[in-house]
Amino acid sequence: MALLAGAAVMAVVDTAFEIVTPDSNNNLISSVVSIAVVYLVMRTLLREEGLVDREGGFGSYFGASLLAGIGAIVGLIFLIVPGLYLMARWSLAPTMVLSQGYRATDALRESWRVTQPFAWKLVLVWFLYYLAFVLLILLVAAPTGYLAMQGAIAEEGTLGAPVTFLLSLLVNLGLIAAAYISVVVFRQIFTATSELEDVFA
C-alpha cells in the first residue's frame, strides 16, 4: 500500500507541475520530491522489519544514493555489465545509511564488502528488475507516442494530464519498487551474515 501511495503522491506532484508550468523545467523539483518519498518509504520499511540499529540522516542517504547512481551511470556508459555490477555492489549503500548510521562513503564501502559473496546474484536481480521496468514503460509509451503523433492527446507538444500522470506513476512505482527490493536484499544478506557470525563466534 505504501508503494502505491508514495508513487501516487509523486505522480500527482509531477502532473501538477506539468499543468501549472508546462514550459518550465520541473525535473529538479520532481527529483527532490521523488528522493524524499523513496527515503521515507525505505526508512519505514526498515523500521517495520526491525532492521534499524542506528538510523542515519537524509544527507548521508542522499549522498550515498547520488554517489552510487553516478558510479552505475559511468559503468553503463562503458558497457551494460559493468554498470549493473557497480549498481548491484553499491545497491545497499542507502540501506546501510538508514539502518546502520553509516556516512555516505562508508556506506558505499560497506555495501561493496557485504555484497561480495552475492555479487552476480544481485546483478541478475537488478537486471531482471530493470528489464521488467523498461518493458512496462515501453508498453505504455508506445501507444502513447502513437496517439500523440495523431494529435489525440497532445496540445502544443505537451502530453495531456492523464498520460503524464500514468507515465509518472509507472516511473515512481519503479523507484519505490527498487527501495522494496533493496530492503529485501538487505534483510537476506543481514540475516545470512548474522547466522555466519553466530556459527563462528
Image (spheres, rainbow, N blue to C red):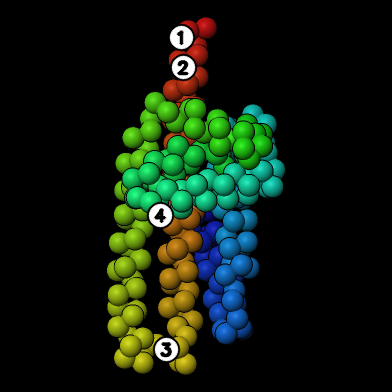
Position above or below: 58 against 168 = above
Name the residue type under label 1.
Val
Q: Secondary structure at mark 4?
A: helix
- Give the distance between the C-alpha atoms of the residues marked 2 and 1, in whole angstroms: 6 Å
Give the numbered dot on residue 154: 3
- Give the distance between the C-alpha atoms of the residues marked 3 and 2, in whole angstroms: 56 Å
Mark 1 vs 4: CB contact within 8 A:
no
Q: Earlier in the sequence, mark 3 or mark 1?
A: 3
Q: Earlier in the sequence, mark 4 or mark 3?
A: 4
- Give the distance between the C-alpha atoms of the residues marked 4 and 3, in whole angstroms: 33 Å
Query: Most extreme residue toward the top, as rendered?
Result: 201
Mark 1 lies on residue: 199
Q: Position of residue 80 (x, y in %)?
A: 34, 50
Mark 3 vs 1: CB contact within 8 A:
no
Determine the residue positioned at 35% across, 40% down: 123
Crowdedness near tag 1: few (<14), some (14–19) or many (≥20) residues, C-alpha within 10 Å: few
Front residue (pair 133, 63): 63
Mark 4 lies on residue: 77
Residue 129 appears in the picture as rendered:
no
Name the residue type under label 2.
Glu
